[in-house]
Image (cartoon, helix red, strand yellow):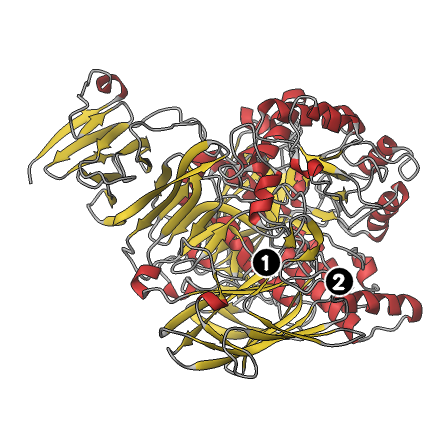
Amino acid sequence: MKSRHLTFTLASALLVTSCATRPYEKSDTGVTVNVRDVNENGTRLVRLQVLGDKLIRVSATPDKKFADNPSLVVVEQKSTPRFEVVETDSSVQVVTSQLTADVLLASGDVKFFDSEGKLILAEDNGGRSFTPIEVEGKKAYTVRQLFESVNDEEGIYGLGQHQADEWNYKGKNEELFQYNTKVSVPFVVSTDNYGILWDSYSLCRWGNPADYKQLGGVFKLYDKDGKEGALTGTYVPAQGETLVQREDSIYFEHLIRGDLAHVVNLPQDFNFAGAHVTYEGSIEADETGLYRFILYYSGYQKVYLDNELIVPERWRTAWNPNSFKFSAELEAGRRIPIKIEWEPDGSVAYCGLRVYSPTDADEQLKMSWWGEMQEQIDYYFVYGDSMDDVISGYRTLTGKAPIMPKWAMGYWQSREKYNTQEEVLSTFTEFRKRNIPIDNIVIDWLHWKEDSWGSHEFDPVRFPDPKGMVDSIHDMDGRVMISVWPKFYVTTDHYKEFDEKGWMYKLPVTDSIRDWVGPGYLSSFYDAYDPEARKLFWQQMYEHYYPLGIDAWWMDASEPNIRDCTDIQYRKDLITPTALGPSTEYFNAYALMNAEAIYDGQRGVDPDKRVFLLTRSGFAGEQRYSTATWSGDIATRWEDMAAQISAGLNFAMSGVPYWTMDIGGFCVENRYVKAQQEFNKTGKENADLKEWRELNTRWYQFGAFAPLFRAHGQWPFREVFNIAPESHPAYKSILYYTKLRYNLMPYIYSLAGMTYYNDYTIMRPLVMDFPADKNVRDIKDEYMFGPDLLVAPVYTYGARSRKVYFPATEGWYDFYTGKFIAGGQTLDIAAPYERMPLFVRAGSILPVGGDIQSTAEVSAEPVTLFVAAGADGSFTLYDDEGINYNYEKGMKSTISLSYDNATSTLTIGNREGEYPGMSQSRKFNIVKVDPTHPVAFDKKATGKMVDYTGKEIKITLD
């Protein structure tokens, strides 16, 4: 094959000219290929742009030119690295020092190779498609990009955080949209050390590009009497006559547009409160294969297939349904009994069961991206030496994650909701009185007068002195976060200020959508896609909240969620048009735009105070706005707790380092409410309250090792002293892990520093640190918290042990005893009520600090450095002022720690850098742990005490 090499730099590329008749055109950033074989609506142009040695942007269009609207996700790249263009008989290649991207001239298909010529990823032959779509007068395309499965055994992770408890998206399907408990981020990372950022803001699908089908569109349906055409639906009310009817689909998934009191396809004159509903009969497949089902559920639901329980009982509160996926191998022509048992647990509830037909196994393994409305295909190929390196590339593209304020690493107390100033102050005071560490208390919605949502004014009756309240919290070394929605009642001055400028969504008002507060108030949301509207949104917050000394912002309902449980099309209609175009095209990025409003606004008026945002929804790039996401209004169920582990890990793999959840779950089963009420009257712990306390205990244990440690939820209250009395094991365990979180603050805040300086990921799936161990690729219920700690949450009621896989490495130590455990094995590990399995990796240097009540406190105790022998190790202690942006100016300190296992020598390196208020000297307590000398990783452990003044010290450990 003949080839020509052309070397390009920014200067030399400007001298190159090319004709439109040539198969490709060169530019200062890459090449554009004029595809030779163009079909109707087929690819006409493919462009490769070099954004880094390991970063390539791929754009494709059926049009004669690219649209090239500015990306909402990708930030401007400051330079273009040196690259070469290599021309062959059939393709043109862009070659950097690390990558080769090859485009076939005939089809425009792209392949990626490493510097040694190994194929990393390839677009599938003919795998790119464009289907014209027109919405609100704008013409664009529904697109799909399919890739070959180069390695069938790779693991693929990311896509945000979803609630079906799935892990490793290789060969799976996921719909990408925003919902209360669902956060879609179109980025994935592969164990083959590459990532794909799909730059689309519309509804997207990963895997199967089609929507799930109704059961009757895939199977022959038979009712319980064997009659073809439908299943049997039996509706048994709490009182009254039973209703029996045939159901040709199980699709009761959203409210009826124009009649938001009823659910589509359900009988409207039936009282679902306290009812029992059964759908039963048989299904018959017309082809043999694996059928993939999606269950949409609220209330209590079970699914039986072929007379076997295939979906054990699941529950979600009636107004906030969830999806769960399961699969079944079915034989063509064979009738299979099916039954769904449903207790709606509310007067308006939801149920749905849909399905995908079998897909060829090889096709299912291919990576597929589908976008509903885009002007062109745009994706970014990110290569790396490791999965960490890939995520670093993602943050190069989308923006670095600033260091969060140090107090955000501590404990946050929240509930729905503190209704008065006295409740806020008395709660925080109780923490201080009991010596329970805490940094932040959260004031939720409805701190305003009932009819004044969006006024940003406290109700003067319930909160007579909001500034005094905030000042009092500050005096106790605490911080205050406040809930701010992008929602405004039409009677407020703020609504009118937006509306007169055309910055409010109109349809919610036109359709008279009223909320759940009091008599129901009329409202709408502002258009965060308009830059001037964003400025006004911040200005209103600044004028009303900022003078009070509010420390952080809780951006709720940022999907945006104008009305729960409406269908996707109505959701799009309610927020269109946006300032940028139809909501069909800009459906998923609202939370990103809203976060930009706050971050840019606060840094504009108070540039030295660290910004902190917590948002219920999120999107690619949110980390650059000092934004964290939580997993929404999840349920108080063990299966929901388990799902948060995989959800949090996938979110971390989506490139966003800060994530949290409602410890204990937000929406509460009625049985727990009744149990707490009974306890309050009688002082007796019944079976449900016993479970409630254990659920919270296990969730707190897990939550202490999330990037952000936060409890929140509906009644019963979530403060530890409201969960259980001091003598109860629940109280003791929650207190232990809260204190442990603060003891680990030198470690945790160093990890926060690493997220900025090294683009680090704090909550780490095992596959990140042990990529060569294929056993970890599908482990979704263990993870690393930083480089040193292996966390194995307990998420089964009554469990007093659990299986733990110890990745193949030099070994592990039990955190509580120091006992050594060899790697590469699965063991049944004790998990008594008060303790969660927790382990330290051999080769770790784990810093453990003294007892403190908040991150503002400086402990007089030494920092204990636990050296886990068995391998060489290193760690860097990081510190700064914790509340400002002086670290951006170099005002911070680092101390390198290294351990030589062969000589048993710990080196505490020279301190690098300084910052105002930094202590010039400190004490370290050095404790070595090895297989022959097991020591619990407790700050009370006795070791070698050394005085450190910033100069290197070498300590030989016996």
Q: Is residue 1 above or below residue 149?
A: above
Q: Is mark 1 on a helix, strand or loop?
A: helix
Kindly identify the residue that appears in the image at 24 percent across and 29 percent down.
Answer: 31
Q: Which of marks 1 and 2 is nearer the N terminus?
A: 2
Q: Residue at x 60, y 45 (%)?
A: 570
Q: How crowded is mark 1: few (under 14 residues within 10 Å), some or many (20 or more)?
A: many
C-alpha separation, residue under disc 1 versus residue under disc 2: 28 Å
Residue 626 visible somewhere in the drawing: yes
**Contact (CB < 8 A) between labels 1 and 2?**
no
Above or below: residue 598 compared with residue 834: above
Callout 2, which amino acid?
Ser
In the picture, measured across the screen, residue 333 lies left or right of residue 148, that is: right
Q: Which of 91 and 320 is in front in this view?
A: 320
Position of 585 relative to 711 (above/below): above
* SS class, disc 2: loop
- Determine the residue positioned at 74% across, 58% down: 735
| Residue found at x 30% / y 50% | 147
Q: x and y percent of residue 744 in the render?
A: 63, 50
Residue pushed farthest left?
A: 2
Q: Quadrant of the N terminus?
A: top left
Instruction: Residue under label 2, please give it.
Output: 347
Which residue corresponds to mark 1?
644
Name which residue type carries label 1: Gln
Q: Position of residue 499 (x, y in %)?
A: 70, 26
Residue 32 position in % (x across, y down): 25, 30
**x, y percentage for residue 947?**
61, 42
Q: Quadrant of residue 733?
A: bottom right
